[in-house]
């Protein structure tokens, strides 16, 4: 009888740990879904960037080409890794776009540009919050996958750690204010 009781307790602990790992994995997927939604929203803003650049920057082919290349990607067909890479590329192109806008006072003053800038800023804030949520979820999940005794169950059922989203080194560097005001 006591052997059955011990086996029952072990089975219950096993089920609780397994279910906890599944919930944490699903929370991580849900958190990435929030990032995915914000990246899609940002991706959908690219046609506005293209139209704005076409209007004011006919001589700025490099920036226009990069924005067009980003737009020509089919967002839904991208993998998680490709979406993360898209995010990094978009940040670089966006920075170049706004630097380009500095050369066109009419562009900066246009209603289209101001609306686009507000929308991008709001999207960036939401994306930042989604990244924080994702990283917290991944940390919680990874801790469950890597700590004893749930690590035993994680290994048995193929639960793998996930990568935390990090900033590229270029974005970690503090900007030099004097460089921002040089023409």
Image: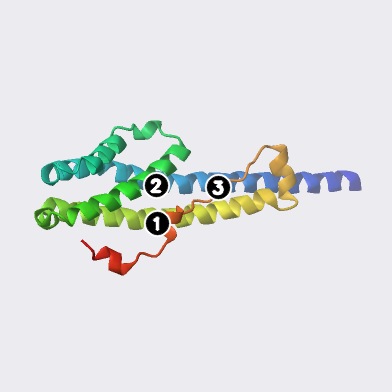
Residue 58 found in image quarter = top left
* Mark 3 and mark 2: Cα distance apart in space: 16 Å
Q: Is residue 4 visible?
A: yes
Q: Which percent across, then down, holds residue 56?
A: 12, 46
Which quarter of the figure is the C terminus placed in? bottom left
Please name the residue shown 29% across and 69% down the image: 178
Looking at this view, is 165 or 103 the one in front? 103
Looking at this view, is 7 or 38 the one in front? 38
Where is 169 relative to 158, above or below?
Answer: below
Q: Is residue 1 visible?
A: no
Residue farthest along the front direction in this orientation: 183
For numbered disc 2, what is the local secondary structure?
Answer: helix
For numbered disc 1, what is the local secondary structure?
Answer: helix
On screen, residue 45 versus residue 58, left or right, reads right
Number of the front mark, 3 or 2: 2
On screen, residue 81 versus residue 48, left or right, reads right
| Cβ–Cβ under 8 Å for marks 1 and 2 | no
Residue topped by disc 1: 128
**Mark 1 Cα-neighbour bin, 10 Å: few <14, some 14–19, many ≥20:** some
Looking at this view, is 175 or 152 the one in front? 175
Q: Which percent across, then down, holds residue 155?
A: 71, 41
Residue topped by disc 2: 88
* Mark 1 and mark 2: Cα distance apart in space: 13 Å
Residue topped by disc 3: 163
Circle nearer the N terminus (1, 3): 1
Residue 52 found in image quarter = top left
């Amino acid at each position: 009888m006591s052997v059955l009781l011990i086996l029952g307790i072990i089975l219950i602990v096993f089920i609780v740990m397994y279910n906890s790992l599944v919930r944490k994995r699903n929370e991580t997927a849900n958190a990435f879904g929030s990032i995915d939604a914000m990246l899609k929203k940002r991706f959908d803003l690219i046609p506005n960037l293209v139209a704005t650049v076409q209007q004011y920057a006919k001589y700025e082919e490099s920036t226009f080409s990069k924005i067009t290349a980003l737009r020509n990607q089919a967002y839904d067909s991208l993998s998680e890794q490709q979406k993360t890479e898209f995010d990094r590329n978009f940040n670089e192109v966006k920075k170049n776009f706004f630097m380009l806008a500095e050369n066109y006072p009419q562009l900066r003053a246009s209603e289209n540009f101001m609306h686009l800038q507000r929308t991008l800023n709001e999207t960036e804030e939401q994306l930042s919050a989604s990244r924080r949520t994702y990283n917290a979820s991944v940390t919680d999940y990874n801790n469950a996958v890597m700590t004893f005794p749930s690590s035993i169950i994680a290994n048995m059922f193929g639960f793998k750690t996930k990568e935390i989203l990090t900033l590229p080194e270029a974005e970690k560097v503090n900007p030099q204010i004097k460089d921002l005001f040089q023409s």
